[in-house]
Image (spheres, rainbow, N blue to C red):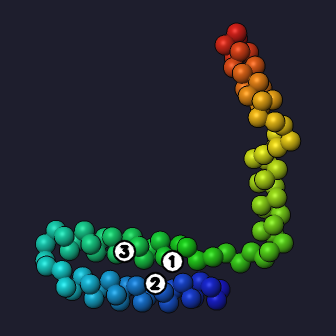
Amino acid sequence: MESFLQTAVIAVIGAMAGEFCLCMLPTGGTRKFCRFIVGLVLVLILLSAPLNIDETQLNEILQTQQETVLPNQNKSYEEMIWDVYNEELENKNK
């Protein structure tokens, strides 16, 4: 909750800075476009509030991702290339 409040404070400061910059722009289409961009940036700042995940959970998540992404980690490049080549031959023959 504390990290979300810190992010909200940053968003409020960003909104104030954005409004200050918008006051210096001339009226017209550019101002409307810039207001949209400032609003989009503020929403992204609020959505980027970090989640409360402790280090053990983060390490478990990274370990499972590493195991699923790199199952052929112990193979040489030559073996991996031959595997891909053989799979493509099988797909072509089907």
Question: What's the residue at 62%, 85% (across, down)?
Answer: 3
Pick whichever of labels 3 and 1 is earlier in the sequence: 3
Residue visible at 70% across and 11% down in the picture: 94
Can you give x and y, in whole percent of width and height, for residue 14 in the image? 40, 85
Instruction: Pick out the residue farthest to the top.
Output: 93
* The N terminus lies in quadrant: bottom right
Quickly name the residue at label 3: 39
Residue type beneath disc 1: Leu
Is 88 placed above or below 24 here? above
Asked if marks 3 and 2 touch (Cβ < 8 Å), the reply is: no
Q: Residue at x 34, y 75 (%)?
A: 38
Q: Check residue 11 in the rendering and tell me which mark sits there, or answer none.
A: 2
Q: Is residue 85 visible?
A: yes
C-beta proximity under 8 Å, tags 2 and 1: yes
C-alpha span from label 3 to label 2 = 10 Å
Mark closest to the chain's N terminus, 2 or 1: 2
Residue position for label 1: 46
